[in-house]
Amino acid sequence: MSRNLILGLCLSSLVLLAALISFVWTPYSHAALNIPAKLQTPSLQHWFGTDHFGRDMFSMIMVGARTSIAVATVAVGIGMTLGVPLGLTAAARKGSWLDEVIMRGNDMVFAFPSLVIAILITAVFGAGAINAIIAIGIFNIPVFARITRGAALSLWEREFILAARVSGKGAARISAEHILPNVANLLIVQGTIQFSLGILAEAGLSYVGLGAQPPTPSWGRMLADAQTMVSFAPHLALIPGFAIIVTVLGLNLLGDGLRDWLDPRIRVARA
Amino acid sequence: MLRYSLKRLISLILSLAVASVVIFTVIEVAPGDPATFMLGVNAQPDTLAALRAELGLDASKLQRYVDWVGGMLTGDFGTSYTYRTPVSQMIADRMWVSLPLALYALTLSTLIAFPAGIYAAARRGKPGDLAVMGATQLGIAVPNFWFAMMLVLIFAINLRWFNAGGFAGWDNGLWTGLQSLTLPAIALALPQAAILARVMRSALLDILGEDFMRTARAKGLSRRQALWRHGMRNALIPVLTIIGLQFSFLLAGSIIIEQVFYLPGLGRLVFQAISARDLIVVESVVMLLVFAVITVNFLVDLAYAAVDPRLRSRT
């Protein structure tokens, strides 16, 4: 395993662990106000300090990790469950009108400025985690469709697929039983990358007030709250920012590491 | 080339048509009636009806869609519900902030990424390369609006080199205008520069492995000479494509950065219009941004195909 993979794995599991532990334990209640203890810098009592309402930042970061992970997971899930079958279908019916329609539709979604449309969707249908998830998820569909089709196309030329066809299996069954397992590695790597993009997108939408709504803590909104106080309480902005960076960096390293690890050809080329 | 251009042009028009239908539909189903919003919930029904007629809200959906698209084609973007000024005028005013900001950021991103990418490629596997690659990993992971806040904290609040926000306008001279756009442009440029530097590096590394580079070295050019005379030109093709795509990212990305710096650009216009339920403004600005992005992508594709004939057959 490469250094990238190990570091990525460590950082990602750290964040995941924080999110999971937050369900059963946080140092303080993330929503408990304690005005006398407001704007404290990090200390032994409050590891990450407190915000302008005296809420414990460490607890808020832990619960915020939950929001980020939940939004990104569902968004990637939407992209995979819709994108992968579309890509498999397009590859199985290569060159047909169906392939053409799917791929042109993909290109179209791809060409849209995703942030602008996400803002439009959340603004029109109301700000909230659900609409943010849908907005981010829609733009994951063409990513997975395209990568699945590309990988599946070359597989369809292989002998073992021919053997499956000779044995009487239909296109749908071949796609599910033989193509999908062989593109799974690729999808896992791409999924990791999309996951990190989802975390960034969620933070951006929450920052402009279009993501998760109070009282659900979210890193993006913590940053928005911190903006007017950054001159006298910089830790309010530094800590959620570091949380986002650690998460995204961890996922990107994990994605890079997994790609090298899962693809034996690259390993040979490097050795 | 002509065939390819025509094919791409048709798909461009198709994309724009679909985009306009999607945006119109989304705005149509949006809850909240602009007339009620403007007059308040206690307005008399006949006053409401009169305003709806004045705003053209009583026409059929299809009629309004045709009017909207037809208007945009002739440069008439309608009239803002809240400001009662032509939307085209509002967009033109705001454009003078958003467009220079995107171009400024693109310039910075290129100026940072090119040397970084070339440096890393030339020192592949050595500490210099690892440092650049590590820095770009970090650059990609940093949310640009957070980076913007940090820039404000350091350069506006502590060092007082720049204003923390707002736009001085172009009337007080080019320098004053550029100064208010500098921090936002740096914030926008950094993550893009990180991506571009990686593309530059890998494009150069691909080229360095080519036979013609070995030939260049064999005929007596130094590594440096071969890189500049033969490597750069070939590596520039994928890099230019990414630069084209980044322009649209920057234009869209400036929406959030404008919020950080209170810049009166298109992004702030969209947010103000959304909260005032000024749907005609939202509709037109979003359509304009989509148009800009799709058109830039189209031009990049054409430029790419003009340089590299192999791409024309592929579509």
Image: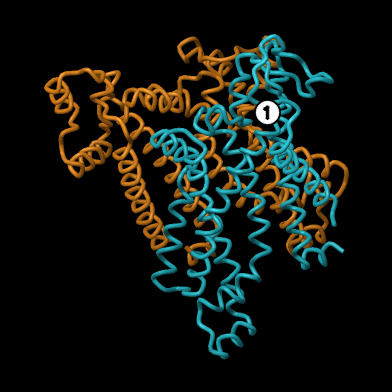
The chain that appears cyan in the image is: A
Horizontal placement of A88 versus B203: left or right? Answer: left
Give residue B31's position: percent from left, percent from top: 32, 34
Horizontal placement of B290 versus A31: left or right? Answer: left
Horizontal placement of A144 versus B121: left or right? Answer: left
Give the vertical position of B235 relative to B252 (above or below).
Answer: below
Q: Which residue is mark 1?
A: A60
Q: Give the quadrant of the C terminus of chain A.
A: bottom right
Q: Tell me what residue is drawn at x 16 percent, y 34 percent.
A: B58
Quadrant of the rendered image containing residue B165:
top right
Q: Give the quadrant of the N terminus of chain A.
A: bottom right
Quadrant of the rendered image containing residue A159:
bottom right
Whether residue B116 is visible to the viewer of this picture, yes or no, is no
Quadrant of the rendered image containing residue B132:
top right
Give residue A165's position: percent from left, percent from top: 55, 86
Q: Amino acid at mark 1?
A: Met
Give residue B203's position: percent from left, percent from top: 69, 52
Q: Tell me what residue is drawn at x 75 percent, y 50 percent.
A: A254
Whether residue B149 is visible to the viewer of this picture, yes or no, is yes
What shade does chain B have?
Answer: orange
Give residue B182's position: percent from left, percent from top: 60, 21
Query: Observer-nearest residue: B182 or B35?
Result: B35
What is the chain identity of the residue bearing mark 1?
A
Q: Tell me what residue is drawn at x 72 percent, y 12 percent.
A: A37
What is the secondary structure assignment of the residue under circle 1? helix
